[in-house]
Amino acid sequence: MTSPEPGTALSRLRSAYAQAKTTPAAEAERSLAAIEATSRNHAFITVATPEQVERSLENLDKLATRAGGPQSLPLYGVPMAVKDNIDVQGFPTTNACPAFAYEPEESAHAVEQIVEAGAIVMGKTNLDQFATGLVGVRSPYGFSESVYGQGIVSGGSSSGSALAVATGVVPVALATDTAGSGRVPAALNGIVGIKPTLGLVSTRGLLPACRSIDGITVMSTSVEDGLTVLRTIVGPDPRNPWGRTPAQLAPSQLDAGWRAPRIGLPAESALEFFGDDAMRAAHLAARGSAVETLSATTVPVDLEPFLEAGALLYAGAWVAERLADMGEFFAAHADEVHPVVREIIEGGAQYSAADGFRTQHKLRSLRHAVRPVWDDVDALLIPTIGTTVTMDEIAAEPFAKNATLGHYTHFGNLLDLAAIAIPAGTTSDGRPCSLMLVGPPYSDLTLASIAARLMPAN
């Protein structure tokens, strides 16, 4: 069994820079060497050239001078990776489809923010093509198993960003999450996946999967590092039609003097582990330990309306939404699209406008049904994944196993919730276990407060 090899924590990197123990140039060089050393996992589609890195370093010097010193830039000299459905000027955007690739005229708003904060973009990471899948194997640019081995898939669609962080190539990365794409690969690679409240991070410059529920997310090896990046990318963007007002993080409901949280727990009988008894045991042990560590008050929560909402994701409006954005390209390049991806997206054509409204109406009623839960709990604590899945299993059942991985994540954006996935040890046979904290919109910092107390600092 292998396991994650975390990169340098941002606090330690900042300290090393302040003490002149390393330089941004040296860290960028180290990151490029690590990309080369781990190239067999196909985490990256495009890697920064030495010339691009040199320009980034020159720009970093200018930013530091203008800001009054490196200490004023929260991401000063931090090597970062960006998922390749997010535009970065100077890098092609492929969406894991060579026929679709183009050169963006400007970077996505979130990328502009990390660069202004001092980050150095080291490359664009691999993904399930058109961000369609939770498995990490639907890419012509190659794919790799989880860092835990055993033939376990790396998870998608943000597979490359997860692998880049889990192998220590970069300490933090940008990813995306529509149906679980930023949480499932985090779970399968033993790292943190932060899915913020929809609309807090601008999606301008993000290629849409389902644009009404798409979000840019953060992957890291610690909650603290992930929050550093999240604080950098959250904020208003006048050019973003999907923004939220106010586009800012709400204060934690727990941190003023810290009170023990109220944790919502589904009945054990309501949890689905797909016959994986080792994962069931690992999860129940992890959640029991979490409740004890937090001195939490536990509140029973009915998980059924959440899962019912998740089941709507591939039942009408949102499959058609994928087709609405990509249908013209698919019609012209059908043979250049991964067959499973093509089948999923072309399936949107079977739904009528009436079907779309029916699913929207159903979702509205389910949002109404779950809203009172947040009067009684600060966070819901559930598995991020109910089991792991191997490459052979995905090959045999690509749709069913994909749904298995999304069982606990599909409902997140549909119900307008915030979520954080955190590692929770391993099963008895060495596979990754992950806990997910879920809360209402604007509960991002409350969830982070809880998550940080469940993870040792790196």
Image (cartoon, rainbow, N blue to C red):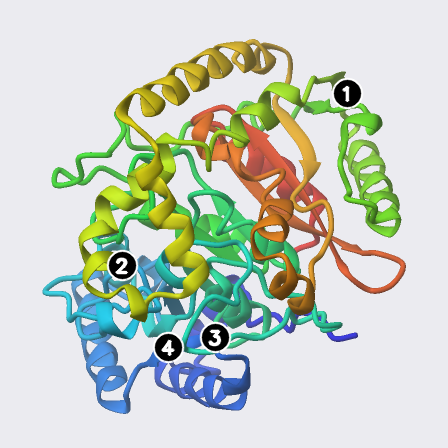
As helix, strand or loop, the secondary structure at mark 1 comes to strand
How many residues crowd around disc 3 within 10 Å: few (fewer than 14), some, or many (20 or more)?
A: many
Q: Mark 4–mark 1 contact, CB under 8 Å? A: no
Query: What is the CA distance from the residue labelled 2 to the residue labelled 4?
Result: 17 Å
x, y percentage for residue 367? Answer: 47, 16
Query: What is the CA distance from the residue labelled 3 to the residue labelled 1?
Result: 39 Å
* Label located before the other in sequence (4 or 1): 4
Disc assigned to residue 399: none
How many residues crowd around disc 2 within 10 Å: few (fewer than 14), some, or many (20 or more)?
A: many
Under mark 2, the amino acid is: Val
Query: What is the CA distance from the residue labelled 4 to the residue labelled 3?
Result: 7 Å
* Label located before the other in sequence (3 or 1): 3
Under mark 3, the amino acid is: Ala
Instruction: Tell me what residue is drawn at x 22 percent, y 46 percent.
Output: 325
Instruction: Tell me what residue is drawn at x 83 percent, y 27 percent.
Output: 269
Disc assigned to residue 43: 3
Disc assigned to residue 111: 2
Q: Nearer the viewer, mark 4 or mark 1?
A: 4
How many residues crowd around disc 4 within 10 Å: few (fewer than 14), some, or many (20 or more)?
A: many
Under mark 4, the amino acid is: Ile
* Quadrant hosting residue 453: top right
Left or right, residue 5 beside residue 168: right
* Label located before the other in sequence (3 or 2): 3
Q: Mark 3–mark 1 contact, CB under 8 Å? A: no
> Camera-side residue: 136 or 324?
324
As helix, strand or loop, the secondary structure at mark 3 comes to loop
Please give the residue where the numbered disc 1 appears in the rendered image. 298
Left or right, residue 53 beside residue 195: left
Disc assigned to residue 45: 4
Q: Mark 2–mark 4 contact, CB under 8 Å? A: no
Instruction: Tell me what residue is drawn at x 65 percent, y 62 percent.
Output: 396
